[in-house]
Amino acid sequence: MEEKVFGLPANSLANSMVVILIVISIILLIGGLRRFILVKMGTRNIPRRKGQSTLIVMGLMLSSIIVAVSLGIGDTVRYSVRSVVFDSAGNVDEIISGPGKQLFGVEYFTYSEFKEVEKLTSNNSNIDGIMPYIEINLPVENIKSEIAESRVQVRGYDSKYSGNFDEIENINNDSTSISSLGLGQVFINMALSDTLNLNKGDTVGVYINLEKQEFEVADVLKNGSLAGANITPTVSFEMSVLQKLLIKENMITNIAVSNVGDQDNSLELSDDVTQFLRLNLTNKQVANKFFNILSSNGIPELIKEEAKSIEQADSETFEELSKISSDLENNNFNEDFITSIGDYQLQLIILGALDKAGLQAEAGQLLMIFGDLTTLRVDDYKNNGVKLAETVATGVTTIFSIFGSFSIMVGMLLIFLVFVLLAAARSTELGMARAVGLKRRDLIQLFTYEGTVYSFLAAIAGTLIGIGLSFGLVYILQDLIDAGTFVIKPYFSITSIIISFSAGLILTFITVFASAYRASNLNIVVSIRGLKEEFVKKASLSTRNKIKNLLWDLIFPIKQFIRLI
């Protein structure tokens, strides 16, 4: 899923800003080469008055700092949540579970259904492998210390498939496998080891069907993937052993699906694989009944309104609901509708919309056939986790940016004030320059060149300080928020650095140019005589002429370059 900043694709935004900076740089370069004396006049005061220059840079870097802090915190949230998702999922991209007929407790289905799925996926080039397993939550106890945890994730893996599906390592970084478990042995992960103070060779008690069963800890595994996430204490069994203990022989709860490619690249195939699985695991006759129910009583328009209400918060769900509504309105029962209606989240949204609209009868009809809609339910597990990370990160970035925008506006006013005061302080110098032949547009260029140097230095300093502040805030939040074993990892992407630097430089440059345009409007006689600073009003111009003059001042360097050629 592509990262977004302020609701826009991050890469596209960064590329656009780089293009704008290149255009600005070319215009300044052309003007500077054409009349280099203006560059020297504009920049000579920077090294001469180091204290003043430092204060100006400090005032100008506010926008860069705020943008950098906002993006840095957003990147950190995104990276931290994604890390948890990848750590928890490992090579698992999609998870297939029961059809949803059982409302409470763990839903099992037969091992023969796994074999059918294995046959179905064997010819799909996007699927790297599948694996059956059992996953339930049970109380677990350290027999020696009598420390207990009421809800621990207990998994049973089929040793025929787990070895090829994903690698597991112990805390000494040695590879191991489920098939190496002996009679009465289990693996635990580091999260459970820390929670219950368990080590290799200790005895752990697992309460199954209200009866305590004791097992030896064969090894302590590194957190992640099949061993369980670092926030999830986990016990791992060989699947056949757990089936017997649960009295669930030949039954499983889930099928893990791994796409071709590494963790990041496999995400690109998630939509195609999920669509393939849902299409083949959905009962088309029941889906047609769904279609007929949803086509009645103005429900298509209701779904469209529901889609509009969540457009800003979740654009992808908006698109899916819009497609469903369009198919219903056009009486188009197709594969896209079948795969979309197989999404459990969309089912819940549609049921909620029907309930709010007072269509309980239709909602009841859908509930009656929900369990028969799919043979097995497909969850786009890893992709949904990454989408959650992106949604949370975008929200955090937007919140900080909204609050920071007020400070940015104040900073832009400060920039304007700084350059007006600079013009006032140098009024005699500027008046003499005008008297010996410089035109107003020359003063604009002079101030623009000086302001560009300040802007460049401020953008660099502001971005670096913003990165430091965002990391500092993250460490403070890590200490203040009791997140358990969830670790907030400071992170700042290259794309965000480019956006922070570019946004700060562009905003500052625009303000500098506007203030230079205003400051250049001075009276020559008043300036030379050192009288009270004032801006002399000229005869009023029409809006059209004002726009022409502004455009002329903007494109003058290009005009000079064309003449030179």
Image (tube, grey):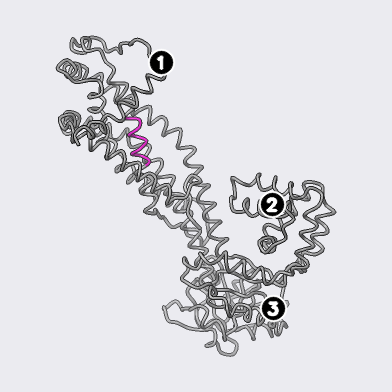
- Nearer to us of marks 2 and 3 is 2
Query: In the image, residue 377 lies at what x, y percent?
Result: 68, 69
In this rendered view, identify the residue nearer to me: 107 or 502: 502
Q: Which residues are magenta?
A: 503-512
Identify which amino acid the numbered label 2 is placed on.
Answer: Ser
User: Mostly what secondary structure, the magenta segment?
Assistant: helix
- What residue is pinned by disc 1? 542
In this rendered view, identify the residue nearer to me: 26 or 200: 26
In this rendered view, identify the residue nearer to me: 397 or 468: 397
* Residue 409 located left or right of residue 522: right
Mark 2, residues whose alpha carbon is within 10 Å: few (<14), some, or many (≥20)? some
- Nearer to us of marks 3 and 1 is 1
Query: In the image, residue 123 lies at what x, y percent?
Result: 58, 79
Label disc, if present, on residue 326 of the rendered structure: 2
Query: Quarter-wise, where is residue 517 in the image?
Result: top left
Label disc, if present, on residue 181 of the rendered structure: none
Determine the residue located farthest toward the right in the rendered image: 361
